[in-house]
Amino acid sequence: MQKVLILFGLLVLVIGLLWPWLSQIPLGRLPGDLSFKRGGTSVHIPLMTCLLLSAALTVLLKLFDGR
């Protein structure tokens, strides 16, 4: 459990340091992401972004599975 927490902390640190460049990636604005505006309220549902990230994480976890 300690190794997992250390790796998670390092991952958060790396993402934080790379954020200026990562924010240029169009995640959250893909075709299939839903956005609604009505009056003063806006709702954004990143459906396609969630599916893409889920598929990528599944592939990565399958590649690094130690079994």
Image (cartoon, rainbow, N blue to C red):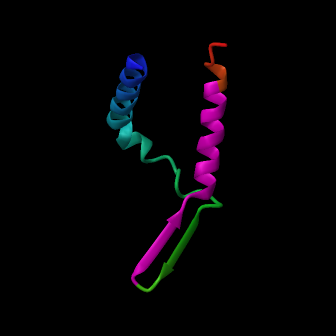
Task: Name the main secondary structure of what is drawn in magenta.
Answer: helix
Q: Is residue 49 magenta?
A: yes
Q: Position of residue 31 (x, y in %)?
A: 64, 60
Q: Position of residue 29 (x, y in %)?
A: 54, 58
Q: Nearer the viewer, residue 28 or 3?
A: 3
Residue extending furthest toward the bottom:
39
| Quarter of the image with the C terminus in it | top right
**Considering only vertical position in the picture, is 51 above or below 16?**
below
Q: Is residue 56 magenta?
A: yes
What residue sits 63% from the left and 18% below the top? 65
Bounds of the magenta segment: 40-61
- Image-quadrant location for residue 7: top left
Going by the image, does 18 lie left or right of 59? left
Q: Position of residue 38 (x, y in %)?
A: 48, 83
| Quarter of the image with the N terminus in it | top left
What residue sits 37% from the left and 33% below the top? 12
